Image: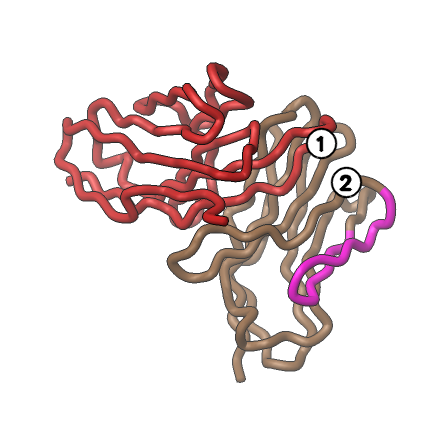
Chain colours: A red, B brown
Amino acid sequence: NAGVTQTPKFQVLKTGQSMTLQCAQDMNHEYMSWYRQDPGMGLRLIHYSVGAGITDQGEVPNGYNVSRSTTEDFPLRLLSAAPSQTSVYFCASTTTSGGAFGELFFGEGSRLTVL
Amino acid sequence: AQSVAQPEDQVNVAEGNPLTVKCTYSVSGNPYLFWYVQYPNRGLQFLLKYITGDNLVKGSYGFEAEFNKSQTSFHLKKPSALVSDSALYFCAVRPLGGYNKLIFGAGTRLAVHP
């Protein structure tokens, strides 16, 4: 059981480049989300999805796009990378069955550096 | 504004001593409260949660947390610390109406010394 898988683990971009962080989960979770982790700021929610075809913005959505075409996958796109997007990115998922918000399962993280 | 505060950047404790990592929250209504742990270069792992009921919640690895509604606190505790408990700990809250969102604190680094 792989859980939540993120790729790549490390990436270096130049300002203005685009890229996609991949996230896949094999637990049939309805809810998926992307967070960024910065020193002293904890985790901040970027975007989230409650099911295929449904996405919504979190706390810090600017500069990022998402889509959810399948239950399993939730990619995060940076259209024009900026140094302020240098961070560690985490994908997380959970079930929403029964109306409960279960504990989040996190991927191992993707460390992005924008020069 | 709804928020979570972890007032200590770092907590130092000797192995075998009890530990407490503090968390307070500012959320309207009855929140869901969570603790997560992060080991170096890893993702966060769920420790425990409070939804309703008994104010003392027991979780993984011998950790427990006490919900105090009057003090709006949810402190993480362990009776006897281990060196392997050294990690970054995050408190999180699901606010009223925030069905799909967790608000995380800034994190507290726990260092357990032999």
Chain ID at mark 1? A
Residue B62 image offset from top left, x and y in percent: 70, 67
Residue B72 image offset from top left, x and y in percent: 75, 43
Task: Residue at 78% x, 46% y: name it.
Answer: B71
Residue A9 image offset from top left, x and y in percent: 29, 48
Residue B33 location, quadrant: top right
The answer to the question of whether label 1 and label 2 lie on touching residues, with beta carbons closer than 8 A, is: yes
Q: Secondary structure at mark 2?
A: loop
Q: Residues within 10 Å of mark 2 (few under 14, many from 20)?
A: some
Residue A52 image offset from top left, x and y in percent: 49, 19
Q: Amino acid at mark 2?
A: Ile
- Looking at this view, is B41 or B5 the one in front? B41
Location of residue A57 with respect to A92 vertically, above or below: above
- Looking at this view, is B32 or A74 the one in front? A74
- Looking at this view, is A87 or A97 the one in front? A97
Magenta part of the chain: B53-66
Instruction: Decide if residue A42 is in sight here.
Output: no
Q: Residues within 10 Å of mark 1 (few under 14, many from 20)?
A: few
Q: Which residue is mark 1?
A: A100
Q: Furthest-bottom residue in view?
A: B114
Q: Amino acid at mark 1?
A: Ala
Task: Residue at 77% x, 40% y: name it.
Answer: B51
Q: Horizontally, is B24 left or right of A75 in the view? A: right
Instruction: Decide if residue A26 is in sight here.
Output: yes
Q: Which residue is mark 2?
A: B51
